[in-house]
Image (cartoon, rainbow, N blue to C red):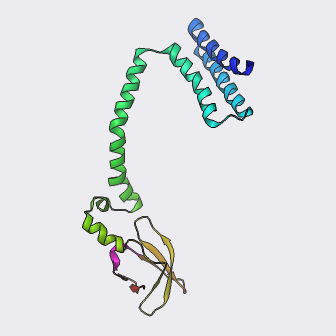
């Protein structure tokens, strides 16, 4: 029972030291000691992660109850409103600017109509084995995030095939024409 009460007493002691002596360093030291004690007790008793998180969060709740100021509520509202605008802007920036620029995708592919989508699904994935003009076998080395694929031949040559090179079961590249069945 003492191991359950003492950590929260340390948090209260930290609040009292902070209020009475205006010395926030001791307040932080006492509170950190209480949080570590609570986390250690939860780990020693093999409590679940949710239980440990809740018991540790209770220290924060105690601080908020005794140190609450109206400015904190205003700051919280400001953070929520800021996130409501920042998250959509970040998602649009990621999908339109960063992803195509650094990871090779096209932002236009995300805005295609249904007819183009159904046409591209037929050529959406390249096979594991393809053949060149001389019916030499080329094997898949890796698939890229934009749908393109790298193949290698038995004699060590490599070719990169983009989906826009594909027409039906053939692909016309600078390295020649490839086909599959």
Residue closest to the far bottom: 134
Locate residue 21 relative to residue 125 in the image: left or right: right
Is residue 163 on the magenta stretch? Answer: yes
Tell me what residue is drawn at x 37 percent, y 21 percent.
74
Q: Nearer the viewer, residue 170 or 119?
A: 119
Residue at image coords 38%, 31%: 80
Could you tell me which quadrant the C terminus lies in?
bottom left
x and y percent of residue 137 in the render? 50, 87
How far across and how far down the image is residue 34, in percent? 66, 22
Q: Is residue 55 above or below residue 124?
A: above
Image label count: 0
| 114 to 44, vertically: above or below | below
Left or right relative to 39: residue 111: left
In this rendering, position of residue 33 left or right of residue 83: right
Please state the horizontal and vertical placement of residue 116, each as a whole percent of the image.
Answer: 27, 68
Q: Where is residue 13, by image quadrant?
A: top right
| Residue 101: % across, % down | 36, 58
| Image vertical order of residue 22 relative to residue 139, above or below | above
106 magenta-colored: no
* Residue range of the region highlighted in magenta in the rendering: 161-168
Residue at left offset 40%, top offset 17%? 71
Image quadrant for the N terminus? top right
Residue 54 image-quadrant placement: top right
Image point (36%, 59%), residue name: 100
């Amino acid at each position: 029972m003492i191991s359950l009460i003492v950590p929260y007493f340390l948090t209260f002691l930290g609040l009292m030291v902070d209020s009475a002596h205006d010395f926030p360093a001791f307040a932080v030291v006492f509170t950190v000691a209480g949080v570590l004690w609570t986390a250690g007790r939860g780990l020693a008793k093999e409590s679940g992660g949710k239980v440990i998180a809740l018991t540790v969060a209770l220290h924060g709740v105690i601080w908020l109850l005794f140190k609450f100021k109206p400015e904190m509520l205003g700051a919280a509202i400001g953070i929520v409103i800021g996130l409501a605008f920042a998250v959509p802007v970040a998602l649009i920036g990621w999908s339109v600017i960063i992803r195509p620029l650094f990871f090779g995708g096209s932002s236009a592919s995300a805005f295609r109509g249904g007819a183009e989508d159904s046409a591209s699904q037929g050529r959406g994935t390249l096979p594991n084995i393809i053949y060149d003009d001389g019916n030499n076998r080329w094997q898949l080395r890796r698939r890229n995030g934009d749908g393109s694929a790298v193949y290698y031949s038995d004699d060590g040559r490599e070719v990169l095939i983009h989906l826009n090179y594909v027409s039906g079961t053939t692909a016309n590249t600078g390295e020649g024409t490839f086909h599959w069945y």
